[in-house]
Amino acid sequence: MSLAKRLMEELETRHEIAVAIARRVGLLEHCDTCDDVYDPLEGNFDDAYMLANHLITKGDPLVEAFRGDRRALTDAIKDVTQNYGEECYCAQRLAKLLAED
């Protein structure tokens, strides 16, 4: 496997870990209807950072890809929230349908 491919896979893994932590504390939400992840703009970064630091401290396998780098993990959590809208897909679709009426 090429170095570039390995780096891309590691970035994707780190992204997935950041999403999992953000979802665990409510920073990101998951819609069971449309399976979309969205940012309800709760801004609960402190809880997400505390959980991330706790997981690194206890050596949790979930955060193994960060190799103990707390800053990289907290930066990933902050970055991941910028990738999602404020509503899930079905809420956006409903708003669009209502606007058309």
Image (cartoon, grey):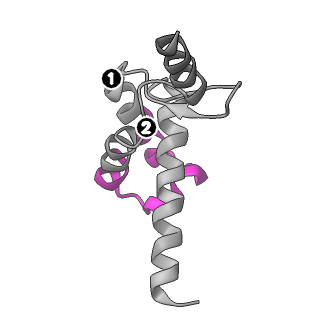
* Residue 45 image point, x, y percent: 33, 29
* Residue 50 image point, x, y percent: 38, 32
Tag of residue 43: 1
Residue 34 appears left or right of 8: right
**First reached walking from the N terminus: tag 2 or tag 1:** 1
Q: Is residue 61 magenta?
A: yes
What is the residue that sits farthest to the bottom in this orientation? 2
What is the residue that sits farthest to the right in this orientation? 33
Density class for disc 2 (Cα within 10 Å; few <14, some 14-19, many ≥20) is: some
Mark 2 vs mark 1, foreground winner is 2
Q: CA distance from mark 2 to mark 1?
A: 13 Å
| Amino acid on which disc 1 is placed | Gly
Q: Is residue 13 above or below residue 60?
A: below
Q: Is residue 83 above or below residue 44?
A: below
What is the residue that sits farthest to the front in this orientation? 101
Q: Is residue 81 above or below residue 46?
A: below
For the N terminus, the image quarter is bottom right
Q: Is residue 91 magenta?
A: no
* Residue 29 image point, x, y percent: 54, 26
Residue 21 appears left or right of 46: right
Q: Which residue corresponds to the image point at 50% horizontal and 38% vertical from the top-left?
A: 21
Q: Which residue corresponds to the image point at 36% horizontal and 23% vertical from the top-left?
A: 44
Q: Report the predominant secondary structure element of the magenta stretch.
A: helix
From where the camera sits, is residue 37 visible?
Answer: yes
| Amino acid on which disc 2 is placed | Tyr
User: Which residue was labeled with disc 2?
Assistant: 84
Q: Which residue corresponds to the image point at 55% horizontal and 17% vertical from the top-left?
A: 97
- Between 46 and 5, the one lying in front of the other is 5
Q: Which residues are magenta?
A: 51-74
- Between 98 and 81, the one lying in front of the other is 98
Element on which disc 2 rests: loop
Q: Which residue corresponds to the image point at 41% horizontal and 25% vertical from the top-left?
A: 86
